Amino acid sequence: MSIIATIMNSATGQPIQKMTFQRMPKPWVSIHLASGEMVTADRVHVGKPAPGKFAAPVEVWVTPKR
């Protein structure tokens, strides 16, 4: 089962893109954004699932250079 995570910008709080991981991302994960920039996660936040749902929202917070 894959994990769909939202990549969030730590500086602005805005979502950058969605990304699929094969397993839960670690807090030190390095990823390539759609712009080609490589970033390291600042933190990984796992939220509570909506009532009656199984999937929990996952956010990976990063600080892009631009």
Image (tube, grey):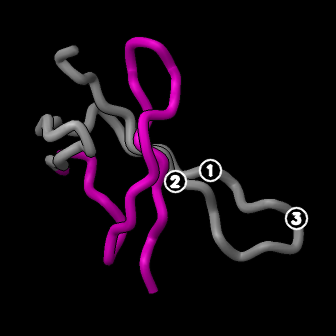
Amino acid type at circle 1 is Gly
Q: Which numbered tag is attached to residue 51?
A: 3
Residue at (33%, 74%) from the top-left corner?
23
Q: Is residue 19 magenta?
A: yes
Circle 3: is it few (<14), some (14-19), or many (20+) Cα within 10 Å? Answer: few
Q: Marks 3 and 1, Cα distance to the nearest angstrom?
A: 12 Å
Residue at (22%, 37%) from the top-left corner?
35
| Disc 1: which residue | 47
Amino acid type at circle 2 is Val
Question: What are the residue bounds of the magenta stretch?
Answer: 1-29
Query: Farthest residue in the right direction?
Result: 51
In the rendered structure, are the residues bearing label 2 and label 1 in contact, judged by CB atoms less than 8 Å apart? Answer: yes
Residue 20 spot, x, y in % from top left: 38, 66
Q: Marks 3 and 2, Cα distance to the nearest angstrom?
A: 16 Å
Q: Place residue 51 in its image quadrant.
A: bottom right
| Disc 2: which residue | 58
Residue 63 spot, x, y in % from top left: 27, 23
Q: Is 66 positioned to the left or the right of 54 in the image?
A: left
Q: Is 46 positioned to the left or the right of 54 in the image?
A: left
